[in-house]
Image (spheres, rainbow, N blue to C red):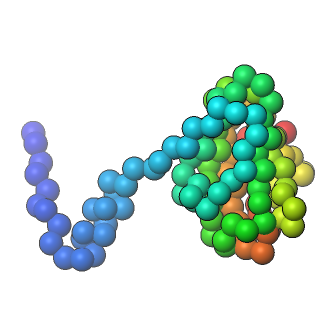
Amino acid sequence: MTFIRPAPTGVGELAEAARRTRQIRVNQQTGTTYTFVVADNDRIVEFTSATAVTATVPSDLPAGWNCVVVQIGAGKVTFAAGGGSTVNSANSKLGISARYGTATIYSRGSGLYLLSGSLN
């Protein structure tokens, strides 16, 4: 049985259709250092390095900025606060715990960030 949904007609329906079909962009990083940028907002940043990675969180990302970070490679991803920024997490853990682990970083504004996920 096939169901055909009518095309959206109103502005609200168009916005909802766009939201449902939105594709999340992936920023794949191969190096051992990276500093997050405004363009990473609402994206996935994948690290594929076989050796340790330092992911720096700068102080100038706007409030509400967020991204998911994935450790694809064997190199452990560790978050570092850039000058003027503070990264807070449960038990002060700042590294992704294992290969294929994930973390989410969220800006509260004024250089304050919350880090959560599979951390150690």
Residue drawn at x 72%, y 22% as measured from the top left: 50
Count the numbered circles shown. 0
Observer-nearest of 65 and 60: 60
Observer-nearest of 15 and 53: 53
Q: Determine whether 64 is above or below 114 in the image.
A: below
Residue drawn at x 9%, y 39% as measured from the top left: 1
Q: Is residue 43 left or right of residue 79?
A: left
Q: Position of residue 98 (x, y in %)?
A: 75, 29
Residue drawn at x 84%, y 50% as measured from the top left: 80
In which image quadrant can residue 101 be found? Answer: top right
Whether residue 70 appears in this view of the structure is: yes
Q: Position of residue 3 (x, y in %)?
A: 12, 48
Q: Position of residue 8 (x, y in %)?
A: 17, 67
Whether residue 100 appears in this view of the structure is: no
Q: Determine whether 40 is above or below 14 in the image.
A: above
Residue drawn at x 63%, y 37% as measured from the top left: 29
The quarter of the picture where the C terminus appears is top right
In which image quadrant can residue 14 be found? Answer: bottom left
Q: Position of residue 4 (x, y in %)?
A: 10, 51
Observer-nearest of 35 and 24: 35
